[in-house]
Image (cartoon, coloured by chain):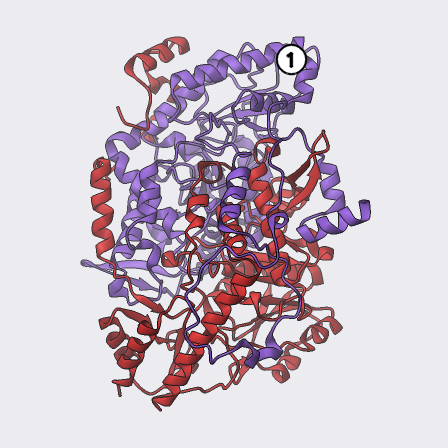
């Protein structure tokens, strides 16, 4: 007997009798004998609940929680307590994709609300609810661009997060599309260089702002430049920053994508998060993933359903634009609750405080004369400095004080040899910031 | 009066629902970067905390979850999602780790990853897994990339075609296309299984491999599996196992032993992690030893008792930001440790017993298109006695009225009125008997009260919806909705 198996001996006997067989094994008669498992799994013995707890506690103790002063795509923002209470409700947690709208209005409604929030943040018309993370959302955005422009080549700004670049490259390479990396100048997209890369095969350009270094990029006139050659502009952004920064829509982008982790989601060693993907209505049929739409029921009541399903794999099979089947629903809910509770003012306040904390640290670090800003560009909550102090020394010294920050970018590119990254969210206290400063001021 | 409010409709300018610490450095202002700031107004709600909690509680009550009642959704393995898994995922340090932290400070997380991938390898009869893939379809894509990479590395450039039975899930052919290969679909035989002659006819030196779900999407075991894998291997192809239906195989058969080289597992099906309304899932990909070099980066490795992160040069590349849906992985590992080898082996047999019991008890009321025993799910093809031409859709909708979730309908595509029922091993005989009784009642209603069925559901938060309207009007956001109401009103 086991707690998740309700069958008693009597139950099993009764069921076998109904089936007119003497053992469950008979139900497996079509399995060839040579592949039937004739031994036990070589895995651990069953643990009681108490033992499971102890096991994970021990695992947990092999980790060390640090005060986070780095970002690179994952940000340690404050999480309102209501989110866990709501996302733990079994009605949301244990249900499946809302195929039966009559018993899934909860899920469908919050997807509609999420789509509305992504719409206003990105300035696009329509959002899906299906992307695994920001990197795969960017890859899907590139596929969309190729499909919209009916061309084969994607230009990738070198200031994208290297993880995003890697994932885009993998997806494009296997699908048989081409790509080129557009270089940066002073830490931001090099507009002059870009013009040399644009040609009649260019389906689109993907840019990121704030970019990998944390810098805010200026896109005035960029969309026009691309549209002149009938190419598509894709803007990738950390969603939280769009609460204050110019939206992809205001920049004239055709597709917006990125990660929603910054909406208070736990760092969780990188996942789960959710990617957002939004576009203009004229491109909606090229967009992968689940989309929810408003309708009415047979009594005229306001209702929501999954719609435009003819785009999707379960209908189009090999001809679908994407193989996406998930809708990353629980994290759609997470994002929706976060944006509901923080609201119009809270999303600005979070950005303001992060901005203040980051800029204070930035100024103090420059004053040490041990750190320099190689770029001199505006930033929000994340910035990159140059230092000749050994990166390992910085890492070790901060770690001793329980801090993770000043992360070395050297591992991503030889060009980034002396660069280190800082991100400071609204969560970081004065005391934590001073502690970090005192450690770094003591190094040479 | 049923709750019918959008979160935006609760909003009042100036209201807040959050509390943040005071500004620490007010000398800095966003005005310093004013030329980079948005000018478009944000249409976000302004609500109190109670209004927020009440709103989501109210809409949650319009949902049906595994804990609301029986959820026999075929092909989705809606088993119970144990509470201990949730506790594990939320407690301790796992939620607080940044993947770029010093490796010495994430040894527990890396050990969890490593042990889980090794455990999945033992359960599957394969050599090594990546946990980086986020979902089943993502796993398929990654598995196919590995298949393609294997042939490319051997300079066998013409192998670009993947064989898929016509009964496969839609994700299979879609994944093949996204991986840059071509689909060759083969027709199933009259028993719903792979037709060996049809398979032989398409084998050539252009075949990269074959994707197969076993038990297949009709819920039956491919009895010729050893011949299938042998034939494909002889032709130089690799075998991909779609783990969608792995639940039935636990304790009985390992995919590696059947001759599969690559597979994915849906942790959110077989290993009990919650479906979350459609995600986040997790789709680890496992391979035999000759393919381990191609697994995606980053890779978690072990040297003595030390765990580290590597990026390998022959890997297909990176397919995710970091280490997949780590907290989902933690839940699955908790489930496996809790069950252990003594209990995990009963998952398959009990799920198969439940499905066959339903099959036997409903065969006089619903058409049984396949005569052999089923595995973990049973497919019917509409009603036996159906003078009023009641459709499968009507039966499914009526089940909702009786407090049960509908099975999967109109899939598999091989039949016209498919009803696919997957009870899972976590359902008791009482629940299953209740379901059987309800299905019989509905079969009776189909004869005596056909209109009730055509109108069903009658007791749910809403009734049947107008899907044509939704597709035509394309109202995807609150902004669209306000415009629509303005124009209508």
Residue A283 as seen in the image, left or right of residue B122: right
Residue A38 as seen in the image, left or right of residue A200: left
Mark 1 falls on what kind of element? helix
Does residue B173 lie above or below B66 as drawn?
below
Q: Position of residue A118 (x, y in %)?
A: 60, 57
Quarter placement of the C terminus of chain A:
bottom left
Q: Which chain is red?
A: A
Residue B290 as seen in the image, left or right of residue A381: left
Q: Which chain is purple?
A: B
Residue B251 picture quarter? top left
In this figure, which residue is indicated by the disc labeled 1?
A: B446
Question: Is disc 1 surrounded by few (<14), some (14 to 19) or many (20+) residues within 10 Å?
Answer: many
Quarter placement of the N terminus of chain A:
top left
Residue that lies at the very extreme toward the bottom in this rendered image: A369
Q: Position of residue B425 (x, y in %)?
A: 38, 26
Q: Nearer the viewer, residue B400 or A231?
A: B400
Q: What residue do we see at 39% from left, 17% from top?
A: B429
């Amino acid at each position: 007997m086991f707690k998740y198996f309700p069958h008693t001996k009597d139950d099993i006997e009764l069921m076998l009798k109904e089936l007119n067989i003497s053992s469950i094994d008979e139900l497996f008669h079509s399995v060839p004998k040579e592949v039937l498992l004739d031994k036990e799994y070589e895995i651990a013995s069953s643990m009681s609940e108490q033992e499971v707890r102890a096991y994970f506690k021990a695992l947990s103790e092999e980790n060390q929680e640090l005060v986070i002063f780095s970002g690179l795509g994952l940000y340690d923002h404050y999480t309102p307590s209501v989110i866990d209470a709501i996302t733990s409700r079994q009605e949301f947690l244990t249900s499946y994709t809302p195929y039966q709208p009559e018993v899934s209005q909860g899920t469908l409604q919050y997807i509609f609300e999420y789509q509305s929030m992504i719409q206003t943040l990105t300035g696009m018309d329509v959002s899906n609810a299906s992307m695994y993370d920001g990197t795969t959302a960017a890859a899907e955005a590139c596929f969309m661009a190729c499909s919209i422009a009916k061309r084969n080549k994607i230009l990738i700004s070198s200031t994208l997060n290297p993880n995003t670049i890697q994932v885009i490259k993998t997806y494009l390479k296997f699908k048989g599309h081409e790509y080129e990396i557009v270089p940066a100048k002073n830490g931001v997209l090099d507009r002059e260089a870009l013009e040399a890369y644009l040609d009649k095969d260019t389906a689109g350009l993907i840019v990121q702002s704030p970019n990998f270094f944390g810098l805010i990029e200026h896109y005035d006139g960029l969309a026009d430049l691309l549209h002149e050659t009938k190419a598509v502009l894709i803007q990738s952004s950390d969603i939280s920053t769009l609460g204050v920064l110019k939206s992809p829509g205001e920049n004239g982008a055709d597709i917006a994508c990125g990660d929603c982790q910054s909406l208070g989601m736990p760092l969780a060693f990188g996942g789960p998060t959710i990617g957002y993907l939004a576009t203009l209505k004229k491109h909606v049929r090229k967009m992968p993933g689940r989309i929810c739409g408003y309708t009415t029921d047979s009594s005229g009541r306001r209702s929501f359903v999954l719609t435009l399903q003819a785009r999707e794999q379960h209908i189009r099979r090999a001809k679908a634009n994407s193989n996406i089947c998930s809708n990353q629903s629980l994290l759609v809910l997470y994002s929706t609750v976060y944006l509901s509770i923080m609201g119009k003012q809270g999303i600005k306040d979070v950005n303001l405080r992060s901005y203040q904390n980051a800029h204070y640290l930035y100024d103090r670090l420059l004053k040490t004369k041990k750190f320099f800003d190689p770029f001199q560009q505006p930033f929000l909550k994340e910035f990159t400095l140059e230092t000749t102090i050994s990166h390992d020394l910085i890492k070790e010294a901060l770690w001793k004080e329980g801090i993770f920050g000043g992360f070395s970018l050297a591992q991503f590119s030889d060009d980034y040899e002396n660069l280190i990254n800082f991100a400071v969210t609204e969560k970081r206290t004065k005391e934590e910031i001073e502690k970090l400063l005192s450690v770094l001021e003591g190094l040479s | 009066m049923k709750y019918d409010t959008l979160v935006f409709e609760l909003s009042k300018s100036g209201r807040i629902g959050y509390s943040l610490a005071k500004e620490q450095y007010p000398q800095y202002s966003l005005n310093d970067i004013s030329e980079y700031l948005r000018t478009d107004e944000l249409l976000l709600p302004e609500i109190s905390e109670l209004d927020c909690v009440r709103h989501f509680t109210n809409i949650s009550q319009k949902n049906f979850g595994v804990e609301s009642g029986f959820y026999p959704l075929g092909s989705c393995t809606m088993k119970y999602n144990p509470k201990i898994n949730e506790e594990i995922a939320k407690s301790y340090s796992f939620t607080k780790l940044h993947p770029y932290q010093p490796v010495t400070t994430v040894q527990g997380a890396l050990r969890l990853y490593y042990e889980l991938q090794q455990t999945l390898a033992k359960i599957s009869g394969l050599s090594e897994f990546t946990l980086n893939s986020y979902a089943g379809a993502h796993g398929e894509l990654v598995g196919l990339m590995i298949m393609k990479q294997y042939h490319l590395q051997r300079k066998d450039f013409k192998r670009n075609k993947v064989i898929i039975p016509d009964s496969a899930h839609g994700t299979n052919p879609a994944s093949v296309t996204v991986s840059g290969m071509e689909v060759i679909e083969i027709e199933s035989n009259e028993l719903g299984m792979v037709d060996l002659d049809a398979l032989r006819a398409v084998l050539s030196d252009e075949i990269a491999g074959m994707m197969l779900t076993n038990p297949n999407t009709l819920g039956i075991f491919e009895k010729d599996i050893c011949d299938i894998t042998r034939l494909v291997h002889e032709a130089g192809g690799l075998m991909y196992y779609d783990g969608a239906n792995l639940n039935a195989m636990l304790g009985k058969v390992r995919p590696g032993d059947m001759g599969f080289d690559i597979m994915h597992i849906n942790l959110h099906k077989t290993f009990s992690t919650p479906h979350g309304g459609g995600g986040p899932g997790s789709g680890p990909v496992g391979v035999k030893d000759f393919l381990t070099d191609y697994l995606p980066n980053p890779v978690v490795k072990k040297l003595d008792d030390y765990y580290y992160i590597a990026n390998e040069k022959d890997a297909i590349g990176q397919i995710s930001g970091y280490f997949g849906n780590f907290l989902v992985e933690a839940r699955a590992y908790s489930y496996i440790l809790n069950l252990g080898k003594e209990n995990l082996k009963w998952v398959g047999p009990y799920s198969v017993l439940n499905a066959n019991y339903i099959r036997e008890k409903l065969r006089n009321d619903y058409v049984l298109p396949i005569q052999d025993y089923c595995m973990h799910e049973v497919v019917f093809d509409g009603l036996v006695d159906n003078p009023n031409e009641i459709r499968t859709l009507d039966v499914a909708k009526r089940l909702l009225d009786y407090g049960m979730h509908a099975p999967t309908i109109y899939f598999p595509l091989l039949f016209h009125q498919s009803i696919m029922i997957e009870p899972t091993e976590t359902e008791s005989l009482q629940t299953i008997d209740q379901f059987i009784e309800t299905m019989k009642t509905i079969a009776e209603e189909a004869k005596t009260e056909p209109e009730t069925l055509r109108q069903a559901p009658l007791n749910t938060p809403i009734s049947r919806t107008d899907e044509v309207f939704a597709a035509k009007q394309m109202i995807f956001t609150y902004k669209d909705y306000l415009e629509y109401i303005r124009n209508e009103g």
